[in-house]
Amino acid sequence: MEQDRYIIRIEGLTKSFGTFTILNGLNLNLEKDRVNIIIGRSGGGKSVLIKHIIGLLKPDKGRILVRDRDIVPMSEREMAHVRREFGMLFQEAALFDSLSVEENVAFPLHEHTSKSYKEIMTIVQDKLAGVGLQGMGSKMPAELSGGMRKRVGLARALVMEPKIVLFDEPTSGLDPVMGATINDLILRTKDEFGATCIVISHDISGTMKIADNIFMLYEGKIIVQGSPEEIKESSDPVVRQFIRGEAKGPIQIN
């Protein structure tokens, strides 16, 4: 059954800002327990799509079913419960600069649970160890490298044990070694923490290594989807130009 296979189903999603249509009848099915990676041009609507999935934006038309529940008509109060199933790693990690590493990771537990301080600290240390940051809890964000900040952000995203983790350009701004480390952590998020991963990425090399499913967003729609092998072999000229990083082709530079 579809609801058993797919954790999120999006049907006919349309969103315009003024006269500019950013999503245009988009359809997308995201499989459970998989690394689902959405690729596409900068400014092409990937971040807008993610904001719809977590209910920060409402579409002009369409349905978004999260675990078979349509979130579009939900109130903000209802959405708050749904969001507890999500973890989010933002592009710049979005840490609180005035809080230590362990305070950043603990923040969702203080806000959304009644656990004791001791229980919270046990969970925090476990998640920090899981991303390779044992003993770093007392550090401040300003003392960390970009890669370490992203790992703290991932620990915070995992602290509520979400069913779905969203990654917004997780390797952006990182050197190739740290980018590979973050990609390995995405795989571990699926394999060890048992979460479905939804990733927005421009890292084509990393995408081909870790994705179970790849979706290309272009002109407001998903124009192709498939395994890394299927995407590499696509005959679509837009897909071929994008994944090869070629200047000439149907994708025009404005």
Image: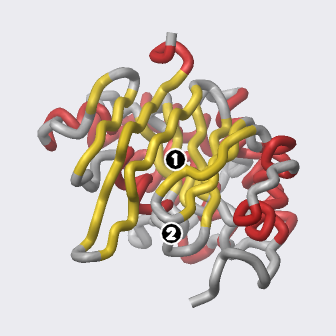
Q: Determine whether label 1 and label 2 are within 8 Å by CB.
A: no
Question: Where does the image place residue 213, in percent across and percent down from the top left?
Answer: 69, 39
Question: Where does the image place residue 92, in percent across and percent down from the top left?
Answer: 53, 69
Dividing the picture into quarters, in which one does residue 78 lie?
top left
Q: Does 185 sit left or right of 144 as displayed?
A: right
Q: Residue at x 23, y 38 (%)?
A: 79
Numbered badge on residue 30: none
Nearer to the camera, 198 or 70: 70
Circle count: 2
- Look at mark 2 in the image and give the residue it sits on: 44
Give the class, few, some or many, for how many residues have Cα within 10 Å of label 2's Cα (few <14, many ≥20). some
- Look at mark 1 in the image and give the residue it sits on: 166
Q: Earlier in the sequence, mark 1 or mark 2?
A: 2
Question: Where does the image place residue 194, in percent across and percent down from the top left?
Answer: 62, 25
Nearer to the camera, 222 or 154: 222
Q: Is residue 31 above or below residue 86?
A: above
Residue 137 shows up from this direction: no
Q: Residue at x 73, y 60 (%)?
A: 239
Nearer to the camera, 75 or 165: 75
Give the class, few, some or many, for how many residues have Cα within 10 Å of label 1's Cα (few <14, many ≥20). many
SS at circle 2: loop
Q: Does 95 sit left or right of 55 as displayed?
A: right
Dividing the picture into quarters, in which one does residue 63 lie?
top left
Q: CA distance from mark 1 to mark 2?
A: 18 Å
Residue 150 shows up from this direction: yes
Q: Residue at x 39, y 59 (%)?
A: 23
Kind of residue sitting beneath label 2: Gly
